[in-house]
Amino acid sequence: MTAAPGGLPTVVGLERERQVLEVALEAGRHVVIEGPPGTGKSTLLRDIARSAGKRVIFVEGNAELTPARLVGQYDPAQVLARGYLPDSFTDGPLLAAMRGGALLYLEEFNRIPEETLNVLITVLAEGEIAVPRLGMIAAGADFRLIAAMNPFDAIGTARVSQAIADRICRVVLGYQDAAAERRITGTATGENGEVVDFAVTLTRATREHRDVRMGASVRGAIDLVLLLTGLARLRGEPALALGSARDAAYAALSGRIRIADGCDRSPESVIDELLAEAWPAQPAPSDPPDGAQPVTGAGDAGDAGDAGDAGDAGDAGDAGEAGDAGDGQGKADGLPPGPAAGHPIRSASASRLRRGRGQGGSRRTLSRAELTARHSSFGDVSPGVGQLDQDSLARLLAAEPDAAATLLADLALATDRQLAAVARRLAARVFVQLAAVGARPARGTRRLGPGTVREGDLDLDRTLDRFSGAWPPADAELVTRSWRAHRRSLCLLIDTSGSMSGLAVAIAAVAAAGVVLSADGRLDPSVVAFGSDVTRLRAAGSGRVPEDLVGELIGLRGHGMTDLAGGLRAAARELAGSHADERVAILLSDCVATSGDDPASALAGIDRLHVLCPLPAPESERAAAALARLGCGVSQPVRRLAEVAPALTRALSRSG
Amino acid sequence: MKTRAAVLRGTGQDFEVTEIDLDGPKAGEVLIRYVAAGLCHSDEHLRHGDIVPRFPLVGGHEGAGIIEEVGPGVTRLKPGDHVICSFLPVCGHCRWCSTGKSNLCDMGATILDGVLPDGTYRFHHNGEDIGGMCMLGTFSERATISENSAVKVDDDLPLDKVVLIGCGVPTGFGSAVHAAATEPGDTIAIYGIGGIGINSVQGAALAGARNVVAIDPLANKREAAEQFGATHSCETAEQAQELITQLTRGVGADKAIVTVGVVTSEVVTSAFNAIRKGGTVVVTGLADPAKNTIQISGALLTLFEKRIQGSLFGSGDPFHDIPRMVELYQSGDLKLDELITTTYTLDQVNQGYEDLIAGKNIRGVILYPDA
C-alpha cells in the first residue's frame, strides 16, 4: 500500500488510469482493475471513492467465499425458531452495497470460485438479484462493482468467465515509471537520494530478470529503504555498505519475487546478480570483506549490456549450471550425461532386453550436420559447437512457436553434449511454461454440495426438512454445504511408437506438463508412455515435478510398434490404484494400432477415454473418434502446440 | 616448447610424469593438444616387459585432441580440427594400404621406437631423444605426430568419449566383424572381457550373432558383457566349452576370439577346441613375442579345417573404420559412454594402470585440463 502517514492522497503517476476509472464509474459501468501487486489498485480506488464521497465495502476474494457469504443469508437460529422472515436475513456485502448504493470492492477477483462469481451476472447485467425466499433486490443508482485482480497470480486462481468479463470494463495498471516509484518510496519512507534510487533500481530490476516470473512491487523498494537505513544506523555505517545492502535486499525482496517455472535458481542468487549490477559504483572501497561474491558477479555482468544478457551470465555462474559454451570439458563433466542418462525406469527397460542391438534407435543422437539439414534456423540458434543463443531462440519462439519447439526437441538429442544439456534444461522450462500459460481447468473439479460433515455453511432448506423441532437440533439433522471435490483420477497415455520426433515430442511434453499442472496440481495424474511396450513416466502420488517429467520425455525417441491395447491396459492399472469417482484416461496417439489386441477390448477400468490426435491424417482422425466414442470421451486433433492446452481443457471439463 | 608427459624409462618401472621438450611439426606433421587419452593394456605390456620397445618412451597410443599447428605440406588437417588418433599410421600408398589392408601399413614398423617417419624424434629431455608410443605418445599434454596418424572428426563429438575409437573399440569390434567375419546366426565365444573383449561383444552382437558367449573370471566383467550384448557368460573356459556344446548341439562355436590380457597357449587351445569344423580362432591379445603361445594339434587343424587368424587393429582400415564407428556411436548402436569406468589426470597414470591390473576398469581414460 502506498498510503502515506496522515492519509495524504498519494496516487502517483496514475492520472490517465484515474480519469478512465472515474468516467467509467460515472457512466454507471462496472470495472475490473488488473495489475500486479503494489501498483496502487487499492490506493487509487480509495482515493476515487473519497473524492466522490462514496462509501466503499471491501471484500477479500478467496476460495472460501461462497455465494451465501457474498449475498447474505438467513440467521439459522431465527429460521429454526420462527421460519423464514425477511427480518431474519442478514445482508452480505453484496446486498449491503446494492441497497446502500455503495461501491463494492472485490479484491483478488480471480480467486473467487466460479459459482460465487455467477451470482454477480444478473447484478452486473440487470442491476438486480433474486435471493431465494427473500425476493428480488434492486441495486441503488450509485451501486458499482469494482474488482481488482493480479493477472500473474497463478496459484488458486482461474480465468474469469466470459459471462462476467462481457459485463465489465477492464482497466490495466502497470508498474509506475521509475520516477513515480522513487516519489512513492520517498514519500512512504521519508528518505531520499542515493538509497531510494538504489532501492527502486534494484526492485525494478527484479521485474525484468529472465528467470523471474513476477518481480517485486514498489512495496519491496519501500521495505528495502527502511531496512537498509535501519541497518546502517544499527551498524554505524556512514554510507551504503554492500553487506548491509545484501542483507536488506534478501529480507525485502526474496520473498516477493517468484522464480519462473522450470528454473531451479534461488531468489537469493537472482538478487545477488542484480545487486552486482544495481550497486552504485563507489569511489571509496567501503565494502566489507564479504563483498567477494558480488564482485565476481559484477565481472560476469560487466560485459552484459542489458538485464537479459545478465541472465545468461548468471546462469553460467550458478553452481552446476555450466551452460556457457566458453566453459570447457572440465566443467562439462559435472553435467548430467547427455544421451540416455540412465534414469532408473529407462535402464530397467534396457536390461530387460539383454541385447543392445535393435535398441540403437532409442540412443541415437543428432549431429550438427543433420540438425542443419532439418532446421533452417539451426545456424542462428546454435552458431557454434556448444552454443545456444537464447535470444535467437526466444525470437523464433515468438515468431514460429511450433518450429522453435520442434528445433528445441531435436536439440535435446544433439551429439553436441553441451548443446544438448542446455537445450534439455531450456526445453523443460519452455514446455512447462507453454503448458502453464494454457488454461488451468481448476473449475469443474469442485462443487458446492450438501453433506453432513461439520464444516461449511448451514444448508437451511435441507436442515429444515430433517428438523424434528427439538432444540438444539441433533448433529444428524444439520446439513451443511461445502466445497466437495469431484474425485477423479487421471492417466495421460503417450504413444511413443513410430516416428515420434520433433513437434510430436514437443506436443507430448506440453501435454504432460499440462496435465500435471492442471487444477493447481490437484489432479496428480499418472503419465505412461507406450510403443510396443510400456514405460511409466510418472506414478500418481509420486509428486514428480513437470520439469523432471518433461526432461525425461524429450529424451525419448520414438520407435517400434504401437500396442494400443497394451497401453490402455497399463493406464487402467495406473488408475486402479486410486479411490476416485471417475477414472479418466487421456490418450495422445494417432490411434492406429500395429500390434496387440483390438484397443476396444482394453477399455475396462477406464470410465472415460479422451483422445488427442497429434498431427492427424484422416485415417487417424477417424480411428481416434471411434475409440473416443467407445470410451465415452471426446476426440480432438492437435495440429499446433497452441492447441494442446485448449484440447486438454476441453477434455478435462467434459468429465464428471 | 615444453610439455608434461608420462615417460617410461625401462621395463618394470613406473611412468614418470615430468616436463620434457617438444619440437614443433616438420613436413607432413601436426602439433596436437590432447583432450583425452585411453589407458590401454598395450602400454602395460611395455611396462611389464611382455613387449620391449625402445626406451625412453612417452606412453599412450589412444588419443583424441585438437590440432594446434600444421607443418609444411600438410593437406588433410588444419589448426582447430578435432581428430581421433589412429595408433597405426596409414601412408595410403604402400602395398598394404593400396590393397585395403592399411592396418598393416609399412609405416607401422617403427611404432615401438616411437620415431616419426623422417627418422627423428620430437620429444627430448636433457639432450636425449624420447619416442612416442605408436608415434603418438598420448600421455602428454601435447605431441607432434604424423598427419597419417590423425583422423578428422566433427567438432560436436565428445572427444573424451570417442577417444576410445583410437584403439580399443575398433580392435575389439573389428576382431568380431572383420577378422572373425561374424554372420547372422553365429555362435561366438569371446575369451577375456577387457577393453578389447567388451567391444568384440558389441561387434558380434551388432553383426547378428545368435549366441555371444563372454568368458571372464571376474563377475563385474561378465555383467558388463551382458549389458553390451552378450547372451551368455561363463567364468571358465571349461564351463564355456560345455555351454557351447549345448547351445550348438555339439557342433561348436562358429568363431572364437581371444582377447585376454596376456595370451597363453592354454587359452588358445581352449578356443581352438571350442570352435566347429571349419571355424576360426581370432587371436587379438598380445604376449611376449619371444614366447610360443600357440600349441595345437596340427592334425586337428588339418582334418577339421580349423583356422587361426591373427588380428591387428581389428583387421580393418583405420581411416574407414574410425569414422564408421563414430557414426555407429551417433546412431546409438555402439556404446562408448558406458565403457568408461574411471577417469584420471595425467599425474594419476600409474594409479590407472594399477586399477587396470586389478580388473577394476572396463576402460580408464586420462582427461587433460583445458588449455
Image (cartoon, helix red, strand yellow):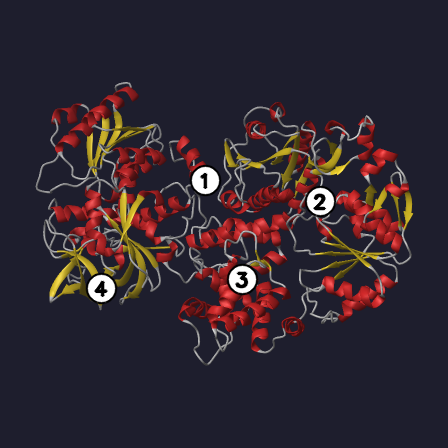
Q: Which residue is mark 2?
A: A64
Mark with earlier residue (3, 1): 3
Check disc 1 and give the amino acid type: Ser
Label 1 residue SS: helix
Say few, some or many: other residues with alpha carbon within 10 Å of mark 4 (under 14 / 14 to 19 / 20 or more): some
Number of the label disc, if any, that sits on residue A362 = 1
> Disc 2 or 3, which lies upstream in sequence?
2
Give, as a three-letter code, the residue at label 4.
Answer: Thr
Q: Quadrant of the C terminus of chain A?
A: top right
Q: Amino acid at mark 2?
A: Glu
Which label number is shown at residue A251? 3
Q: In the rendered structure, the residue with mark 4 lies on which chain?
A: B
Disc sitting over residue B3 in the figure: 4
Residue situated in front as seen by the camera: B210 or B183: B210
CA separation in Å, label 2 and label 1? 49 Å
The answer to which of B342 and B167 lies nearer the viewer is B342
Chain of the residue where label 3 is placed in the rendered structure: A
State whether discs 4 and 1 lie on one chain.
Answer: no
